[in-house]
Structure formats: C-alpha cells, structure tokens
Image (cartoon, rainbow, N blue to C red):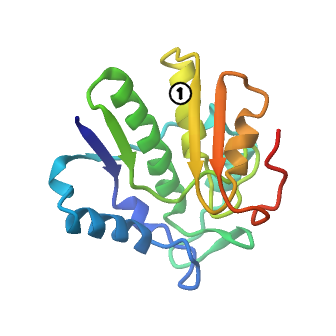
Amino acid sequence: MSTAIYSHPDCLRHEMGDWHPESPSRLQAIDDQLILARLDGLLEQRSAPLADVADILRNHTPGALALVRDHVPAAGDYYPLDGDTILCHDSYRAALRAAGAAVAATDAVIAGEVDNAFCSVRPPGHHATPGTPMGFCFFNNVAIAARHAMEVHGLERIAIVDFDVHHGNGTADSFRNDPRVLMAGLFQHPFYPYCDPEP
C-alpha cells in the first residue's frame, strides 16, 4: 500500500501570534512523530501545490476569497478577520498550499498513483464556511477537495469523517443540502463553535 504525504514550507510560515494555539509546531510535531515511529521513509513526500482560484471558488464565495486575499498585511504585521482567525503576510499563500494539497491528494488517489494520502498542512479548514473564514480557518480544504472530486472527476458520493474536539461547522454548512455528501463528525458538545450540529 502506497501513501503520499503532502506538505510545504509555506505552511510553516503562517503565524497568528506567539500566543495562538494553532501554530507551526503542529506540523513539526507530525514530522517528529513520523520519524520517531520510523514511518517517514515509508511515505512518498510530495510538495503541496498552490490551489487555483477556481479551486477555492468551488466551495467559497468570491467575497470570502477576497476577504482573505485582499487583507494580507505587510511583513511583520497581523490582520484579524475575527478574534482568533488572524492573517499574517504569509497566510494567504499558506492557505492556498493547504487547499492545493487537498486537491492534489484527491487527484493522486483517484488516478491510482497512490492508495491514500495525508495532508500535513496548515492553516486548517473545517470551520471556514462558504462565505466566512473563522475558527483559525480561511478556506475549507476538505470541502474544496470534495467539490473537486465531484465536479472534476465525476464522483457521485463522498463521505467525510471529521474527527476534532470542535464540530466541523464549515464542512457541514458546505454540504448541508447536498445529498451526495455524507458528513460524519466526532466532537465535544457543547463546545466551540456552539452551533447546532444537526442539519
């Protein structure tokens, strides 16, 4: 069984401040554990490409894209989209890499190049709704990949399993009225984002 792992140094450059819990150390911890478990040599390392604007717009509104793209601050500065979703100079590029990794991984698995794939990327995505970046998330990587699989490759059914302490509200909102997608989530309730997890 072959497994590809997609990542890129740009994902380490996204910073929301020293105080912020979503930090580059998350990806460094994944790399460290793969080495410790001696799994790093069994994985096919692949570079995460930049997502195209068309990829982002498969799931997000033009306004959501513009909100992130058009508010990238100067190097060394931050721009808060909300209290915990903060842009730095490298955030937009990192977000395009994260979404691009999800699309490339989808393409590789569907083409039979690999049996499965893992995306070691950030920023994360499951809180980003089609119209609103939120909860540390700018673009919803898995929703973008699912839409790509359906619209580009013609897949008729998609199952998404979201395992996180927080409900993947953005993913649920992306597919709430789409019978082709089953979204199953395991999360703590009640807890952020304090929304009704039911359709």
Which residue is found at the position 41% from the left and 44% from the top?
101
On the image, the x and y values in percent for residue 184 come to 64, 41
Say if residue 54 shows up in the picture.
no
Locate the C terminus by quadrant.
top right
Residue that lies at the very extreme toward the left in this rendered image: 41
Above-or-below relation of 34 to 150: below
On the image, the x and y values in percent for residue 131 come to 76, 45
Q: Residues within 10 Å of mark 1 (few under 14, many from 20)?
A: many
What is the number of callouts on the image?
Answer: 1
Q: Quadrant of residue 165?
A: bottom right
- 150 sits left or right of 193 in the view: left
Say if residue 114 shows up in the picture.
yes
Residue that lies at the very extreme toward the bottom in this rendered image: 19
Which residue is found at the position 22% from the left and 35% from the top?
1
Kind of residue sitting beneath label 1: His
SS at circle 1: helix
Above-or-below relation of 163 to 184: below
- 118 sits left or right of 157 in the view: left
Q: Quadrant of residue 29?
A: bottom left
Q: Which residue is mark 1?
A: 148
On the image, the x and y values in percent for residue 9 come to 34, 61
- 125 sits left or right of 153 in the view: right
Q: Nearer the viewer, residue 67 or 186?
A: 186
Above-or-below relation of 15 to 143: below
Q: Nearer the viewer, residue 135 or 166?
A: 166
Which residue is found at the position 57% from the left and 42% from the top?
161
Q: Nearer the viewer, residue 96 or 117?
A: 117
On the image, the x and y values in percent for residue 183 come to 65, 37
